[in-house]
Image (spheres, helix red, strand yellow):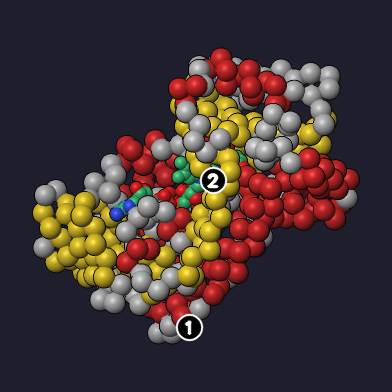
Amino acid sequence: MPIRTQVAIVGAGPAGLVLAQLLHLRGIDSVVIENRSRSYVEQRIRAGVLEHGTTDLLTDAGVGERMHREGMVHNGVELLFDGEGHRIAFDELAGKGIMVYGQHEVVKDLIAARLATGRPLYFEVSDVVVDPAAAVVRFVHDGQPVELRADYIAGCDGFHGVCRPAIADLTVFEREYPFAWLGILAQAAPSSHELIYAYSPRGFALHSMRSPTVTRNYLQVAPDEDLDEWPDERIWSELRARLDRHGGFTLTDGPILEKGVTTMRSFVVEPMQHGRLFLAGDAAHIVPPTGAKGLNLAVADVKVLADALELFYVKGSDSGLAAYSTTCLRRVWRVQHFSWWMTSMLHRSRDGDPFEQQLQLSQLRYVVSSRAAATSLAENYVGLPLPG
Ligand code: FAD
Ligand code: PHB
C-alpha cells in the first residue's frame, strides 16, 4: 500500500515526536513510524533533566502543561567531594534553572498531542528499510507491507536504528569509557532538594529524582557489571557510602521499581545528512549521561530541522536544509565536550591512577571556588541558547 507525505519520521522517541509536533504547528504533513508499542515507549525510563531551552520549546509547542504542573524546577545542583557538598547556583550564575521531569512523561505528553492532531503515528511496525536517495521508507504494519513516499526522511530512530546504517560515507568519532552506570528507580522520597553529583574514592554516585515520592539514583560500576551481584541492600549501602559526608547524610530508601546498567560512550557521525535523509538525536550522536544532555541535544537537532523544513516549504529555500549538519554539529561538539568533561572529572578510573585523582580533585576545587569556572559549568548545564 503506497502512502504519500511531506516528511517521513522514523522513530517515536523525543526527537521524532518533537519534530512531528513542530512540523504540525507549521502546517507540514508527516507520518511517524515506531517499531515498539505505545506502552513500551511510554514506560521506558531514561533521562530526567530538561534544559531551559527544552522546556521553553515544549511550552511553545503546546505540550508543556503537565510538565509545568508536575515537573520540579531546580536552580542548582550539588557537587560532593572530600566529604563536603558545594552548591552550583544556576539561577545566580546563568540566570536560569532546569526542569526535572522524566523523559517517559515527555514522551506521553507528545504522543497524546500527536494523536490529538489526527496525523498518523504507527506503532509496532517492522522490517523498516529506508532509501535516502528516493526518500522512500518501506515497512510492515498490521501484517501489510507499506511504501511511504516522502520529500524528506527524518532518521530519529536512536542509536540502534536503521537510518544511520543506510548512509555509506560517514565519519565516526567515538570514545568508550571504562565504566558504566547502574541506575535504579525507587519508591522513596528524595533525600535532597537538588541533584547530588558525588565524587568518592568508591566511585561516582548520583542522587536524582522524578517526583516528591520517587528517586532515581546511579552508581558507577564496571561496563560488564552483573546485576545479579547487586541485591537491593547492596545498592542502598553503596549509595549511602558514596553519598556520605562530614556531619552525615540520611538517604531515604524504599522499594526498587526498576534497575539496569547503562554503558557509557561518546559518539558522533559526520555529516548528519545524506541525500534526503536527515539524522537527529541518538541516531547521530551519543553522550555519556553525566551532563544530562542526551534528550536535550535530540530536541535541539529537531528544532534546527523543523526551522529548515519550514524555510523550504514556506519560502522555497533549501539553505537551512543544506546547512543542517553544520548547524547541528556546532552544538553537538560543545555538548560532547561538556559531557566528556563532567564524566572525566567525576569518575574514578579502575586502576586508581593517583595522578588522575589529584587532577580531578584540583578541577573540582577550582569549579566550586572560582565564579568563572562555576559559571561555565552552570551555563552548559542549563543549556546554551537553541539556534534560531
Ligand atoms: P530514542 O529515545 O532512542 O528514540 C528512538 C526511537 O526509535 C525509539 O522509540 C525506538 O524504539 C525507535 N526505533 C528504533 N529503531 C527503529 C526502527 N527500525 N523503526 C522504527 N522505530 C525505531 N540521557 C540522560 O541525559 N540521562 C539518562 O539517565 C539517560 N539514560 C539513558 C538510558 C538508556 C538505556 C539509553 C539508551 C539512553 C539514556 N539517555 C539518558 C539518553 C537519552 O535518553 C537519549 O539521548 C534520548 O532518548 C534521545 O532521543 P531520541 O529520540 O534521539 O532517541
Ligand atoms: C536522571 O535523573 O536520570 C539523571 C539526572 C542527571 C544526569 C543523568 C541522569 O546527569
- Which image quadrant: the N terminus? bottom left
User: Residue at the spot x=75%, y=23% of the render?
Assistant: 244
Residue nearest the viewer, comparing 82 with 88: 82
* Residue 239 in sight in this render: yes
Residue 220 % position (x, y): 61, 34
The quarter of the displayed image where residue 137 is located: bottom left
Residue 122 % position (x, y): 25, 51
In the image, taking residue 265 as reference, residue 251 lies left or right, namely: right
Q: Dot 2 corresponds to which residue?
A: 264
Q: Secondary structure at mark 2?
A: strand
Residue 352 % position (x, y): 71, 37
CB-based contact (under 8 Å), mark 1 and mark 2:
no
- Which image quadrant: the C terminus? bottom right
User: Residue at the spot x=36%, y=45% of the render?
Assistant: 112
Rendered view: 32 above or below 369 = below
Rendered view: 278 above or below 86 = below
Q: Dot 1 corresponds to which residue?
A: 319
Q: Secondary structure at mark 1?
A: helix
* Residue 118 in sight in this render: no
In the image, taking residue 118 as reference, residue 164 lies left or right, namely: right
Q: Does the beta carbon at disc 1 come under 8 Å from ligand 1?
A: no
Badge 1 or badge 2: first in the primary sequence: 2
Other residues around mark 2 within 10 Å, as few (<14) / some (14–19) / many (≥20):
many
Residue 278 % position (x, y): 40, 69
Disc 2 residue type?
Answer: Met
In the image, taking residue 314 as reference, residue 51 lies left or right, namely: right
The quarter of the displayed image where residue 175 is located: bottom right
User: Residue at the spot x=55%, y=73% of the render?
Assistant: 327
| Label drawn at residue 99 | none
Disc 1 residue type?
Answer: Ser
Q: CA distance from mark 1 to mark 2?
A: 35 Å
Which tag is nearer the camera, tag 1 or tag 2? 2
